[in-house]
Amino acid sequence: MFGKLSIYSKHFDWVLFASVLLLICVGLAEIYSIALGQSAIDLLNFQKQLGFVFLGIVLLFAFAFFDYYNLRSYSNYLVLAGVLMLVTVLIFGNTIRGTKGWFSFAGFGLQPVEFIKFILIVFLARYFSSASLKIKPLKHLMISFGGVLIFITLVLAQPDFGSALILFAIWFAMIILAGFNKKYFIIIFLVLALIMSGSWFCLFKDYQKERVMTFLNPSFEPLNQGYNISQAIIAIGAGGLTGRGLGFGSQSQLKFLPEAQTDFIFAVVAEELGFFGAVLVLLFFCIFFWRCLSHLRKIKNDFAVFFILGAASLIFIEMFINIAMNMGLLPVIGISLPFLSYGGSAMISNLILVGVIESIIIRNNINY
């Protein structure tokens, strides 16, 4: 047993793990800093996040030493479990900020949709790796999207538009990487345009319309959505080159910046650690993506290739949207920054993703 652990440790990508660990440390430092700005210092969220990180890292190593290929066999069961979770949360879940998407256990919240992202990547990786994509490609597009649509429909029922968008983005990124003909993407964009136009009048709630209008014109809601974006931009600009220091960011410490430890944690990083701190965060993300992609050329298993592409796509999409939201480049849709934002479900799910990537790397290097 110890001999096997030694071999696994030798082929474990410690650079990839270190990049993730450094991102987590930055997030923990900022969550601690935000707690210091409260009138009565409350470290409960910081302590919870520490617990989530510990559990996530344990699961990361457990999945790293687990044979990832078994996930391919279990993908159908995972999909059924995912659908069951989403249906159950609609019936028995708790409503937070207008979204019925959480289970509560002893003061802790579990958000199933974060684990649905992992399940969706497994499902798509299995499907695309087993299908002959050049034969009847439209059929494969429709079948793969059918699976995604089930999840999206249940998530929209909560309603959680941001998470539904991420699920669609995972599928869209993976069909691009799978090499489907460009004509299908033109059709998809046209269909999306029609759906979005219809949704604006029939499905979008007032607060969702306000977010879009605020993005196009920040002065549209200066005391609500526009205020959030304006404060985030002020925080980023106030940091300068070196920042104001941990615990000294006026926007976050004086509570001008809303949702500082979740949606707008990048603005807190930029204010307290400055331009150099923000660049450092981006550098750690770049190292993560570089390590993921550098292994692809050596991997001969299609399921493994699609899984890494899907996992890296998810982290990149969430990172890009969150940072763009903080800078006023995209509407605020409630997407957290991977590995940094407060949230146990997202942290644990993302670390499981990293664990499966490490499992792929280990077994590929052993058999290379």
Image: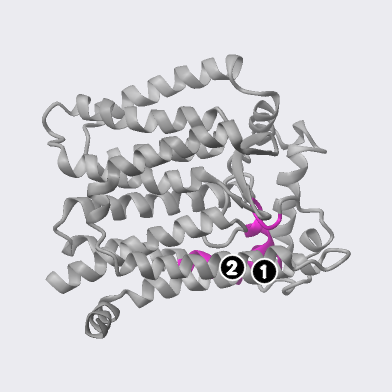
Distance from Cα at disc 2 to Cα at disc 1? 6 Å
Q: Residue at x 50, y 43 (%)?
A: 113
Kindly tell me whether residue 1 is visible in this rendering: yes
User: In this rendering, would 165 be left or right of 134?
Assistant: right
Do the numbered discs 2 and 1 sit on residues whose CB atoms are within 8 Å?
yes
Q: Quadrant of residue 245?
A: bottom right
Kindly tell me whether residue 290 is visible in this rendering: no
How was the colour assigned to the protein in this rendering?
one colour
Q: Which residue is mark 1?
A: 47
Disc 1 packing (10 Å; few <14; some 14–19; many ≥20): some
Q: Which residue is mark 2?
A: 51
| Residue 100 picture location, percent across and down | 62, 35
Q: Residue at x 80, y 37 (%)?
A: 222
Q: Which residues are magenta?
A: 260-284
| Residue 336 picture location, percent across and down | 57, 51
- Decide: is 163 above or below 220: below
